[in-house]
Image (tube, grey):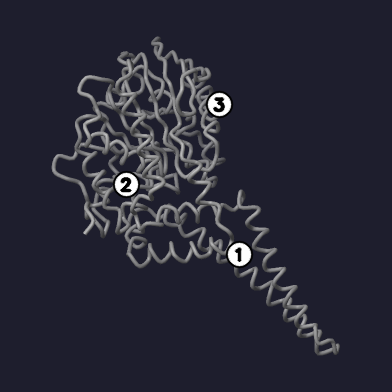
Amino acid sequence: MSGNATGQTVKRRRVFYIPGYDPFHPRRYRELYRSEGAAQAAISGYEIGLKPKTTKGPYGWHVISVQDGNKVETGIEVLYWSDIVKQSMSNSIPATYLQLARTAWIYISSGALFRLMRLRKGPVIAALYPVGMLLGQLFLALASLWTCVWVASFAATWITSPGATLLGILAGLAAAIGTLRWFRARDGKFFAYYLMHDYAHTAQARGATPEDLRQRMSEFGELIASALHDPVDEVLVVGHSSGAHLGVSVLADLLRTGRVPDKGPVLSFLTLGQVVPMVSFLPEAHELRADLRDLCRSDRLAWLDVTAPGDGCAFALCDPVSVSGVAPEGKRWPLVISAAFTQTLLPETWAKLRWRFFRLHFQYLCAFDRPGDYDYFRVTAGPMTLAERFAGRAPSKSRIEKAVSRFTSVAAA
């Protein structure tokens, strides 16, 4: 069915949103939902409103929506790991350059970088951007150092002060350090350090899950498992960007350990702007590849993957299971579709956003001028389950399903 269907099977829903590599407080997502939900409701002709959350648990909010004459109540909670992100971003400038060297070596020596290039150029360029940007900043810093030393050396030929060269070296060091600190202080504009920390965190264990994140994912699993015993009609897990592969592992673990009840709410999984290959293509990502293999053939949930070629930070229309080389016989999921930004946004909106790469990476959570089948606020607050809403929907014809990853093992050697 399309997003225009009027049947109601969901009156109450719980949504768990897993953000990507984001150091900000989850209230940012509440305000985004509030403003963009209101904009989409005005465009699409339904009602949506937010109320404060009144129950214990992770940060969240309550949504009441009336769509196609049906009232739905939804509790949305953010499964945040921003504290782990902040800790991984606390490195000094020298430590960040060491991260750069180590991360580049992992992706190049393993061959993962060259395999990723066979998929989509956008996210690979995004991965190379911080490398180029940080090296450029280092070049400017060294140029400042060299200039000061050269000026001091030139001056020393005209004056007899023995300290002129030393003074030039000290001034050059101060200029170099000042240059690097200037760029670091303005990384909110350049995003070089942010992206470098993101990729370094992803690659730090060569694809294996870091222990601190593993513990947090276990906590996520407990919260979702508990919700599956609540009197609601659907439990929807949304994984955005890096949160997509976290959601894959959390749900695969729930299914393997028998914590998805036979009689309970419908379990649904929505991945948005996923970057799964950045992890699954690494040599030690055995667990993630096993999770992808297991989750894709389960009949206990529905999994929809939404990306868009206009999003240069995502592996658009790349089936995360198939390209990772772990698609088994009987593969069912995910259903891969496009948000088709060039069609669902007005030309003037697209022109405004086209080069705002980070903003486009969040477009999946925002209002569309001409929404197609995918509407974030119908999916999260509408009267139908994810499976019902997209029943009969064909996958994107331009999706990539060819196995590309060099590493396909699902167990450590």
> In the image, residue 144 lies at what x, y percent?
69, 71
Residue 60 or residue 390, whichever sits in front: 60
Disc 3 is placed on an element classified as: helix
Disc 1 is placed on an element classified as: helix
Q: Who comes first in sequence, dot 2 or dot 3?
A: 3
- The label shown at residue 35 is 3
Horizontally, residue 76 falls left or right of residue 355, namely left
Alpha-carbon neighbours of circle 1 within 10 Å: few (<14), some, or many (≥20)? many
* Marker count (numbered): 3
Label 1 is placed on what type of residue?
Gln
> In the image, residue 222 lies at what x, y percent?
34, 31
Q: Which residue is mark 1?
A: 137
Q: Who comes first in sequence, dot 1 or dot 2?
A: 1
Measuring 45% from the left and 48% from the top, which residue is drawn there? 313
Label 3 is placed on what type of residue?
Ser
| Vertical position of residue 401 compared to residue 256: above or below | below
Alpha-carbon neighbours of circle 2 within 10 Å: few (<14), some, or many (≥20)? many
Measuring 61% from the left and 48% from the top, which residue is drawn there? 188
| Vertical position of residue 386 compared to residue 297: above or below | above
Alpha-carbon neighbours of circle 3 within 10 Å: few (<14), some, or many (≥20)? some
Label 2 is placed on what type of residue?
Cys
Q: Which residue is mark 2?
A: 318
Residue at the farthest left position: 329
Of discs 1 and 3, which sits in the foreground? Answer: 1
| Vertical position of residue 233 compared to residue 396: above or below | above
The quadrant the C terminus occupies is: bottom left
Measuring 49% from the left and 46% from the top, which residue is drawn there? 85
Label 1 to label 3: alpha-carbon separation: 37 Å
- The label shown at residue 5 is none
> In the image, residue 142 lies at what x, y percent?
64, 72
Q: Who comes first in sequence, dot 1 or dot 3?
A: 3
